[in-house]
């Protein structure tokens, strides 16, 4: 059965996009090639269609209190026109999803959720709002999303907007920005480890914005970029991917996201379970590793040490930036120290690897 299409589907075909089924969506995995697109984002800029992501509007007098109960991070720490990254947990500490919260006001927030979790998250939010005066709207089909990412993204975007982009701080947004003559929500956010912006617009405006951005970025080396390099970029920056480094069976603490859990909050769903986990000490955690032998560690491959299975690869790839085979894995904490020797079982053979510090890559800070 044919998957769902974003409003930019025809544009992807016209630019030579190789379309794959991604969680029920027909999306480009690459155009010219994953390596070229990856390097373009690290060195210049890439333009992504991420319209498959979900958006849920939370409004009402209890909006802040509702979200404060729902997520692990502290929603009261952000002001209007600021965004917050946070996990959202089940009572047992497992992860429902990780998401962005955009605050318009104390009574109005936009949640940006993972595409594969839209239905599940919507059902979860509905089930949790019983005692709160809030109204929820699933706007996922009414919003298209583009992401321009890379060190030259600010320079390129400046050609198609009058907004003061250099003054827009990381994880802040302009609710009604003019981009390419269209009114959009413009945020300085992204999922690549680079500077960048995300543009939330009406589906009918997305093609014009896409074309005008590519035209404005031509002299800067801007390229359309697919999901393939989006994954290798986030992977190098050790940003978690739901279903891999986070899941209903992997808590934010195990994923290394403790800084996004605010235990000083009076209460939130999963607090007791996470506190118990923290105080008892973690039995397993997500680690980063380099593969010194031959072969790429793929998600699901066993991780061994001293003849025993100690965990599993959650993500693995060749790193174009570092020219190494790298991986992330969920392993027994006993073996998690940096420098520890481990083995990845690749096609039935144990291949040598070593635990290293996260992240693999972090972008150079602007001078």
Image: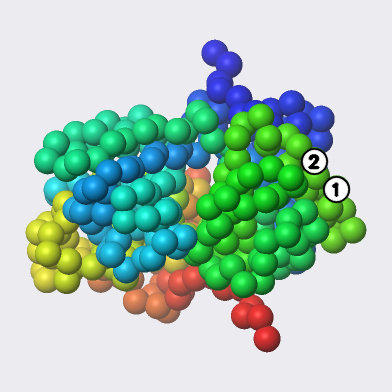
Say which element carries label 1.
Answer: helix
Q: Image point 37% across, 49% down: which residue?
A: 109
Residue 142 place in picture, x, y as percent: 52, 30
- Drawn side of residue 320 relative to residue 142, left or right: right
Residue placed farthest to the right in the image?
219
Task: Report the quarter where the N terminus lies.
Answer: top right
Residue 176 place in picture, x, y as percent: 57, 50
Q: Dot 2: within a 10 Å radius of its alpha carbon, few (fewer than 14), some, or many (20 or more) residues?
A: few
User: Relative to 311, is 180 above or below?
Assistant: above
Residue 129 placement: quadrant? top left
Residue placed farthest to the top in the image?
1
Residue 281 placement: quadrant? bottom left
| Residue picked out by circle 1 | 215
Residue 136 place in picture, x, y as percent: 31, 36
Which mark, residue 211?
2
Q: Are marks 1 and 2 in contact (CB under 8 Å)?
A: yes
Residue 300 visible from this viewpoint: no
């Amino acid at each position: 059965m044919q998957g769902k299409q974003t409003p930019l589907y025809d544009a992807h075909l016209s630019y030579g996009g190789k379309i794959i089924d991604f969680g029920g969506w027909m999306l480009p995995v690459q155009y010219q090639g994953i390596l070229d697109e990856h390097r373009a984002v690290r060195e210049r800029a890439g333009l992504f269609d991420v319209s498959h992501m979900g958006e849920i509007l939370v409004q009402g007098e209890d909006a802040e209190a509702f979200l404060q109960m729902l997520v692990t991070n502290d929603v009261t720490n952000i002001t209007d026109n600021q965004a917050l990254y946070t996990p959202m947990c089940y009572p047992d500490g497992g992860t429902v999803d990780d998401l962005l919260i955009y605050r318009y006001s104390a009574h109005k927030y936009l949640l940006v959720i993972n595409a594969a979790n839209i239905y599940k998250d919507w059902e979860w939010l509905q089930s949790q709002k019983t005692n709160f005066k809030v109204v929820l709207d699933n706007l996922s089909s009414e919003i298209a999303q583009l992401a321009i990412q890379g060190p030259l993204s600010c320079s390129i975007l400046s050609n198609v907007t009058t907004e003061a982009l250099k003054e827009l701080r990381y994880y802040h947004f302009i609710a009604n920005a003019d981009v390419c003559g269209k009114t959009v929500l413009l945020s300085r956010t992204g999922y690549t480890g680079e500077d960048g912006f995300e543009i939330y617009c009406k589906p009918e405006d997305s093609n014009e914005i896409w074309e005008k951005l590519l035209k404005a970025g031509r002299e800067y080396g801007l390229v359309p970029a697919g999901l393939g390099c989006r994954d290798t970029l986030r992977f190098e920056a050790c940003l978690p991917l739901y279903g891999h480094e986070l899941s209903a069976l992997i808590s934010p603490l195990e994923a290394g996201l403790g800084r996004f859990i605010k235990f000083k909050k009076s209460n939130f769903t999963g607090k007791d379970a996470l506190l118990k986990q923290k105080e008892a000490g973690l039995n397993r955690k997500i680690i980063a590793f380099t593969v010194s032998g031959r072969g790429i560690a793929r998600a699901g491959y066993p991780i061994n040490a001293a003849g025993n299975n100690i965990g599993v690869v959650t993500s693995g790839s060749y790193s174009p930036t570092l020219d190494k085979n790298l991986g992330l894995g969920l392993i027994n904490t006993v073996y998690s120290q940096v420098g520890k020797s481990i083995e990845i079982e690749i096609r039935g053979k144990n291949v040598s690897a070593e635990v290293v510090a996260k992240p693999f890559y972090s972008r150079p800070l602007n001078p």
